[in-house]
Every structure is written in C-alpha cells, then in structure tokens.
Image: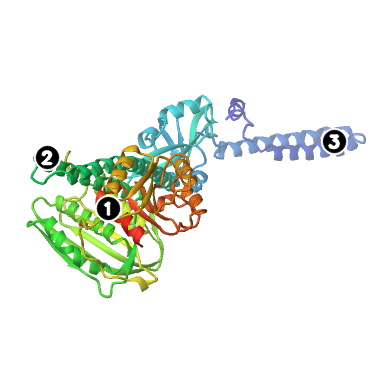
Amino acid sequence: MPAELKDNLHLPFGTANWTTVRAALGLLAVAQLLLLSIYLEYAPAYFITSLALGSAAFYFLITLTQTRKSMPITLPPEVEKVDHIGSDLFDDLPVPMIDTGENGEILQANVAACTLIGRDDLVGETLDGIVEGLGRSIRDRMKDTMKGFGLGRPEMARCRRDGIDVYIQVTMSKMKRGGKTTVLAVLSDATELKTLEAQFVQSQKMQAVGQLAGGIAHDFNNILTAIMGHADLLLHRTDILSPDYEDLNQIKQNSNRAAALIGQLLAFSRKQTLRPKSLHLDDTLCELSHLLNRLLGEKVALHTEHGANLKPVRVDERQFEQVIMNLVVNARDAMPDGGTVVIRTRNETLHKELRRDRAVVHPGDYVVVEVRDTGVGIPADKISKIFEPFFTTKKVGEGTGLGLATVYGIIKQTGGFVFVDSTEGSGSQFLIYLPVNDEPIDVVKPEPRVEVVESNQTGRGRVLLVEDEAPVRAFAARALALRGYTVTQASSGEEALDVLKGGDEFDIFVSDVVMPGKNGPTWVREALATRPGAKVVFVSGYAEDAFQDGDPEIPNAAFLAKPFSLVELTQKVKEQIEA
C-alpha cells in the first residue's frame, strides 16, 4: 500500500465518505443562494439563517466523522510478487514441462511431466539428478541456456521409470519473471523413436557384418578349394600304407571342418545355396532324432511332440536339420549336469500381426517349432545379443559364436522368424515360425542320408576351364585331366571368348561366377550366341542365387559350390556332359 494512503487514514476525516460530504455541501450552497436573495430584502434574517445552517453543517460533519471512525477499516490487499507460472494453467497443460532455477532445482513440474518421469512429485529435486543427457550433461545444457545458447534445440536424454530406460527429448528455454531467470524444460517421450533408431542401427550393423562374412567366406572358399583339391591329388597317388597318407588325410579332414565353418558364415550372411522343397517337418524330425540322441549323450533326455495334421512348409531340409542340431547342441551345453530337451511342433494361425523382438509376423498360417531346455538360461542383459555373430556366453575356446547366428540366418533366408524366451536359472525356449506352403503339390518325404562315394569318374571330352584364382584353376585342370578330359584353361571371361574365336569346339564350359571384368554368366551368354548347345558348370564361393542379374536363365547350366573336392568336381562334369 502507498505511504500517502496510510498517512491519510490518521486524519480526522480520513475515513469519511466524501461523496456524501460533497452532496451536503452542494445543498448548503443552494440554500445560501436562496438566502442571498432574502438578504437583499432583509439583512438580519440572512445573518441568522446562515449561522443556523453553518451550525447544522458542522454538526453533520462531526457526526459523519465519528460514525466512520467506529467502522472497521478494510485495507486493500497487498499485491505479492509472482514467482511461479499460474499453477492451474501449468498443471492442465498436456505437454510435460518442468521449470527450474539457475542451480537446476525444480521449482514447478506439471502432471504430464511427473507421469512421464514416473514420480508423484518432482519439486525440490534437481533436473540433472533425474534425467541423464546422452550427449552433453543436463547441467551443461542448462548453463548454455542461461547464456542464451542453443535455445529451443531438442536433445536426447534418458531416465529410469519402473526399472526401464525411457528416452526423452528435452527442449530448454530461458524465462524471466519477477526479476529472476529460470529455465523452462519441455519434455516429450522419444522411447519409440529411439527404439526404431536402435532397430535401424542394428539392422545396418548386421547387414555390414553379413557382407563382411560373405566376402570372407568367398575368398576363404577359394583357398579351401585349392587346399582340399591338392590334398586329394596327393591322396590319389599315395599308398594307403604310406606314413604320409594319414597326414594328408588329416589335412583333408580339417579342411572339411573349415568348410563347415565357412558354411556357417554364409548361412549367417544369408548367402548360402538353399534347395527348398515342401515337406512335413515331423517326418524330418523323426529321421533326425537318432542323430540328436547321439549328440545329447546320456545325461540329457530328448522328447519330441508332434502336432496333429502338421501342414507342409517349404524349406531346405539339410539347412533345417542344421538349425535343429545347433539349437539342440546349444541346449546340451546349457545343461552340464543333465536335463531335458523338448522339441514340439504345431500349426498356428495368426489373425493379427505379431510384433516382438523388432520383428513383425504378418497374419497367416504358420508351423511353429519349439525347442525348450531345462538349462541355466540366458541373462537378461545378453538375450538381445545372442543372434549376433561371434557372440557367445560360453567360456573362451568352447564356442565360435556362430551357432545361433547360423540359425538366425537360415530361418530368415527361408522366410521365417525365430524368437527366444529365457529366464536365468529356468531354461530357454526357442520358437521358430515357418510359413505354411500354399502349394503342397511338391511335398516329398525326407531323403535318406547318403555319403558321397567315389565311383567311376572317368570321362572323355573337351573342357574349357575359366577361373581367375590360379591355385583353384591348377587343381581343377589336373583333376579333370586325371579323369581323362582334355582341358583348356583361361583366367578371365575375355580370355575365354578369345579362345572360342579360334574355332575350337568344347563339350562343356566350367567357369567361376565372380571374376574381374566379364563375370561367368556374362561371357557364357556371349559364347552361347555361336554355340547355343554348350553345357555349363558354374562354380562359386557364393550362393547360387547371389549372381542372379535379372537376365534369363542360362540353359543347360549346373552349379557347384566351393569348396569342392576332386570327386565332386569330376562327378558334376560327367553328369552334365551325359545329361
């Protein structure tokens, strides 16, 4: 209240109703005018009347003053300084907002902000104590905001809500009210955005690793082909009783092990050659159960439960068997003291999308394969990484880290999905969703396992061998010549076309697929323009469909995957010539 107003309250007429006083004085003035007219007629009467009116006016003013003094004095309310935003408006805003002081202490937080953070009340806490900046710290951001830097620029932060990381987008602005400067932080839930970003980064990383693995596998397959091939040549001319025979056989066996490892890399990178066909998985699992029992040993029991009327699926049978064996071996290793592995199959129809583990399973009919164990389980902080290549929970030297990555690669290349549920100490469960084959006309029974045996591989004919890797070309040329073929060598597609320009006739072309300059399919198509009936065997360290370029398929062409042995090469050439 102003000092002048307080001082006037102590005057005799300080509390008088001055509107009433002015009205009374106005009436007196009118009466005086009337009396003045009388004065002109009779002066003594005017004097007496004026004295009486003055006395009455004085008495009226004194009475009015005493009455006003006896009434309670109501002072105008003190107007306090506003330090906060209007509480009702602030709380009703649907946007999470936090108002903090210069030291980071929270002065106000609306209901939306408390709900987002997962607290009942935030006042009194510090903003950097409940929210963690992902790039710069919240405290540094507040200092920049107070200096006027980066105003209105959103940045990512993180907080814990109910034990789960919640990602928040924080936008800070400087505000001035009542002589004080505060920082207003506007928050928004960015958890879904961050999840999508993590999925994209993960997919990019897996794609990059897959490309790397596929490239390494291709180059290593060339090396293995040369090692295995020359080992076969030495074994062919070494007596079985020779002390060198066993050493050469060890080279061959370890080369086969390396080839299996490269096969896992190709499976992870989804670049292995698949031979899908429609079949019933229960038949395949019955055939496989004998091998699985041997893999599990005596301490671990195997139970299989097949669903009724299981629908057919289209898969590569050998690759599917590899998936089941990898899962079963993984389960065995998780039960060092013994336990049980259960394999169940069933039909399942999804009427709506199934979203989990960054994947979306579309509605439709599926065959579900469940592999459950009673082992030690997978820790919660590692379960999201188990399908990554070279990641393993086993001790150093006990695993390659490619078993589950191979499972993931094969299932994804087949068009299915694989998920895992695990509780540490209670075992793990892997669920495989495979789409039902809508055209079951090619349903076949599982083929019996047969070993490649060396039969009569001798043949006759002229072979044009095209291979850019000199060691592989040298082995293949010697292997074919050993079986009776006449071999002409070329190191590139261009050189092969130059050879054909000489007019020589060949019974078959054996060509690598990926080569500098003109690749295998390119030069072969050009050669077929003058030799339309030529037969071809393509060899490659990549999958058969990795070199599909959209052009029509080459007739009379077969495919042989690297690494291949002497027997496999000569047998494939003989089959193709005689076809």
Amino acid type of the residue that numbered disc 1 sits on in the rendered structure: Glu
Q: CA distance from mark 1 to mark 3?
A: 152 Å
- Tags 3 and 2 touching, CB below 8 Å: no
Q: Which residue is at the front of the view, 24 or 8?
A: 8
Q: Is residue 412 above or below residue 541?
A: below
**Residue 358 visible from this viewpoint:** no
Depth check, front residue: 361 or 507: 507
| Residue 454 picture quarter | bottom left
Q: Give the Cα distance between marks 3 and 2.
A: 162 Å
Q: Looking at the image, tell me whether mark 3 or mark 2 is earlier in sequence order.
A: 3
Q: Nearer the viewer, mark 1 or mark 3?
A: 1
Indicate which disc, 1 or 3, sits on the residue closer to the N terminus. Answer: 3
Q: Earlier in the sequence, mark 1 or mark 2?
A: 2
Give the quarter of the image for residue 439: bottom left
Residue type indicated by callout 3: Ala
Which residue was labeled with disc 1?
568
Q: Which residue is mark 3?
A: 45
Residue 301, percent from left and from top: 11, 61
Q: Residue furthest right?
A: 41
- Give the quarter of the figure containing the N terminus: top right
Above or below 345: residue 131: above
Q: Is residue 518 left or right of residue 457?
A: right
Secondary structure type for disc 3? helix
Q: Which mark, residue 244?
A: 2
| Left or right placement of residue 213 versus residue 91 in this view | left
- The residue type indicated by label 2 comes to Asp
Q: On the rendered structure, is 57 left or right of 294?
A: right
Q: Secondary structure at mark 2?
A: helix
